[in-house]
Image (cartoon, rainbow, N blue to C red):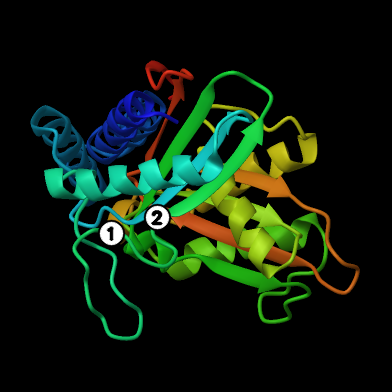
């Protein structure tokens, strides 16, 4: 990657960070509006949605972060095989530093032992880069900014779980998802969106649950069993009366996305990643020259 390419890719990555941090994608805005329409006029739930809507508009207008916690920085990138992955990662880290200086990212990353903040969002595990080469001639760059409040609501179950009466079956998986929602009680800045992984080991399960959040809000799972779990858990969660921010109401969840991984016979994990209403997830198709060709959400 020569100096000209590095400059173009740096500009593209900074713009992807800016847009992700300050502008909710269309599919998420539509889900927020649908939830707002479902709530009763004059209710706390309706008021919460109105505040959320104003926040979305102001952040976009001023090109400022939607939330004071710009969260963990998760990049998922497919890149042409002819490119050097290490060089690409270096440019992405530079983009994070520059985006932090510009105010698109808060200075959120601290040393876990000392609590020291470098002010750059760079450190072990930050940003989290998932880079995979492919045979296409363009880049698929997706970014998720996941706040600490919603990350704290993530949970992993090992089935069978006698505490909630969940066995190693679809019914047990549903019980895990609904238990996660019930325990959150609006924390994590609901209404939420859940990414769920059935199976895998503990680490792979959480990785898959977060990757499920890269799907579009309105898509339909191609697996009919998983599609059923998604539809039924959203419907049932929205009868719990928890509502946005835990204020009560009809919209506790805006969506559930479920994937399944192979597992060992001795293990049956259900991993749940909770995402807040400020669903900061964006992506772009980037040319081999470093030009953003189209937005993916």
Residue sitting at the far bottom: 113
Query: Does residue 27 sit above or below 68 in this rendering?
Result: above
Query: Are the two marked residues, 2 and 1, in contact with CB atoms closer than 8 angstroms?
Result: yes
Residue 55 location, quadrant: top left
> Left of 287 or right of it: where is 24?
left
Mark 1 or mark 2, which is nearer the start of the sequence?
Answer: 1
Query: Does residue 137 sit above or below 34 in this rendering?
Result: above
- Residue topped by disc 2: 127
Quadrant assignment for the C terminus:
top left
The label number, if any, that marks residue 267 in the structure image: none
Q: Where is residue 231 in the image (x, y as percent from the top left)?
A: 62, 39
Pointer 1 local density, CA inside 10 Å: few below 14, some 14–19, many at least 20:
many
Task: Using the image as rendered, state which of residue 135 and residue 161 is in the foreground.
Answer: 135
Rendered residue at 14%/33% (across/down): 63
Task: Using the image as rendered, state which of residue 56 and residue 204 is in the foreground.
Answer: 204
Pointer 2 local density, CA inside 10 Å: few below 14, some 14–19, many at least 20:
some
Q: Position of residue 20 (x, y in %)?
A: 31, 36
Rendered residue at 24%/57% (across/down): 69
Q: Position of residue 161 (x, y in %)?
A: 72, 77
Query: Does residue 170 sit above or below 229 in this rendering?
Result: below
Residue sitting at the far top: 293
Query: Dot 2: what SS?
Result: loop
Q: Where is residue 14 in the image (x, y as percent from the top left)?
A: 27, 35
The label number, if any, that marks residue 121 in the structure image: 1
Quadrant assignment for the N terminus:
top left
Task: Using the image as rendered, state which of residue 105 and residue 33 is in the foreground.
Answer: 105
Inspect this view and state whether residue 26 appears: yes
Rendered residue at 48%/19% (across/down): 288
Rendered residue at 53%/65% (across/down): 180
Residue 99 location, quadrant: top left
Query: Dot 1: what SS?
Result: loop
């Amino acid at each position: 990657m020569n100096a000209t390419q590095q400059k173009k890719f740096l500009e593209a990555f900074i713009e992807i960070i800016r847009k992700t941090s300050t502008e909710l994608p269309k599919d998420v805005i539509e889900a927020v509006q649908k939830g707002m329409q479902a709530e009763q006029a004059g209710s706390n739930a309706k008021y919460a949605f109105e505040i959320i809507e104003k926040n979305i508009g102001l952040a976009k207008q001023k090109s400022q972060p939607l939330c004071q916690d710009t969260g963990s920085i998760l990049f998922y990138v497919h890149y042409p095989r002819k490119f050097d992955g290490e060089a690409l990662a270096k440019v992405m880290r530079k983009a994070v530093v520059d985006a932090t200086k510009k105010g698109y990212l808060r200075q959120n990353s601290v040393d876990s032992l000392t609590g020291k903040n470098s002010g750059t969002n760079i450190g072990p595990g930050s940003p989290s880069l998932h880079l995979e080469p492919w045979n296409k001639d363009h880049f698929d760059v997706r970014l998720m900014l996941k706040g600490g409040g919603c990350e704290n609501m993530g949970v992993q179950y090992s089935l069978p779980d006698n505490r909630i009466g969940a066995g190693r079956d679809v019914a047990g998986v549903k019980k895990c998802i609904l238990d996660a929602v019930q325990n959150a009680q609006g924390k994590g800045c609901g209404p939420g969106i859940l990414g769920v992984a059935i199976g895998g080991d503990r680490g792979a399960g959480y990785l898959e649950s977060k990757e499920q959040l890269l799907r579009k809000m309105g898509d339909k799972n191609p697996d009919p069993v998983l599609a059923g779990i998604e539809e039924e858990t959203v419907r049932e969660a929205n009868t719990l009366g928890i509502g946005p921010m835990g204020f009560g109401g009809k919209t506790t969840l805006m969506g559930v996305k479920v994937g399944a991984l192979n597992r060992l016979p001795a293990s049956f994990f259900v991993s749940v990643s909770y995402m807040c209403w400020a669903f900061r997830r964006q992506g772009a198709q980037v040319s081999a020259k470093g030009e953003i060709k189209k937005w993916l959400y």
